[in-house]
Image (cartoon, rainbow, N blue to C red):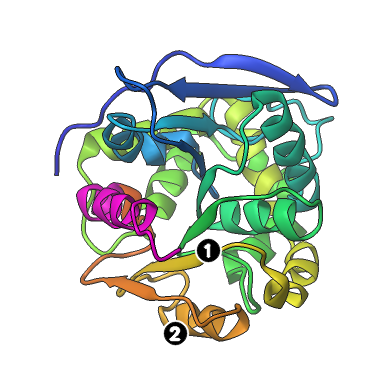
Amino acid sequence: MSAPLPLPEPTDVEIDGAVIATRVLEPTATPVGDVVLCHGTPWSSRVWSRVAHDLSRGYRVFLWDMPGYGQSTKDPAVLVDLRSQMKRLTELLAQWDVDRPHMVAHDVGGAVALGAHLLHGVEYRDVFLWDIVTLDPWGSSFFRLVADNPQVFAALPPALHAALVTEYIAGAVNHNLPASDVAALAQPWLDAVGQAAFYRQIASLSPADTRPVAQHLGEMRCPVRIGWGSRDPWIPVQQAYELQAALPGTPSVIELDDVGHLAPVESSSAVSQALRDWFSDGSQ
């Protein structure tokens, strides 16, 4: 696994009072298209760093940290439920002035991207979904425990909180990540503001916000491809095929062997290659 690649410093965009950290990676030549990358929980745009740099050799690549995550606002007054994030993505795409981008989404970012399309009318050229959270059931017993006791978890001693976050991240992958990757993924959650935000975003996530998206999956208006880690410990690969059955046209499923939930980090080169092949597929 190659060393983590730093992303450029973010440009802040304000939408409905929420300050959103955004980044755009530009190719040196004229771009052949626009790609938008959406992250999930408890991640940030950093999960896409290697993939973003690779794709930016030919594409203009747009990234954002959802409010409540990464370098975006963690103000407790800002709602971080999925319905709110769907609306923000819709507005952000309008501010970026991107026309029918290639949409790539991971984890709950898949629900957000699909919701912007199916519930808010955003158009994409195509969509590639990686280990996404949309179909029931989802949400672990840990999610339910945090939802019932967010203030208790927010008050954990910092060292205990840091150990919990690190272990939580480790539980998403099939093999140990390099310490540099774990540190980069955990870093936004480790100060006092981040600790409170970590448990607040978990408590705000609900299948009630993904069910309306799931109910409209048959109404997708663009081509879709699905990618999944064959050893995903959070969302079993069987759900990739349930998602396939719910979407029009029986989209292809790509399984990455021996990969867990964090394919963009665990196997970034395979993810990048799958995306380049998909974008250049004239049969779409």
Say whether residue 263 is magenta: no
- The percent coordinates of residue 106 (x first, y second) are 49, 54
**What segment carries the magenta color?**
265-284
Look at 36% across and 55% down and name the residue there.
Answer: 262
Q: Is residue 280 magenta?
A: yes
Residue 51 image offset from top left, x and y in percent:
32, 40
Residue occupying image coordinates x 47% and y 84%: 241
In front of the other: 273 or 31: 31
Considering depth in this image, is 136 or 60 the residue closer to the camera?
Answer: 60
Q: How far across and how far down the image is residue 38, in percent?
A: 54, 44
Res 205 seen here: no
Classify 10 Å Cα crowding around label 1: few (below 14), some (14-19), many (20 and above): many
Which quadrant holds residue 93? Answer: top right
Q: Quadrant of the N terminus?
A: top left
Q: In terms of secondary structure, where does tag 2 sit?
A: helix
Q: Is residue 146 visible?
A: yes
Q: Is residue 232 above or below residue 201?
A: below
Residue extending furthest toward the front: 282
The part of the image, by quadrant, that contains residue 182 is: top left
SS for callout 1: loop
- Specify whether 210 is left or right of 267: right
- Judging by the rendered image, the residue that carries numbered circle 2 is 238
Three-letter amino acid code at disc 2?
Answer: Gln
Q: Is residue 31 above or below residue 103?
A: above
Asked whether the residues under the numbered discs 1 and 2 touch, taking CB atoms below 8 Å apart as contact, a structural biologist would say no
Circle number at residue 132: 1
15 to the left or right of 278: right
* Residue positioned 77% across, 76% down in the render: 215
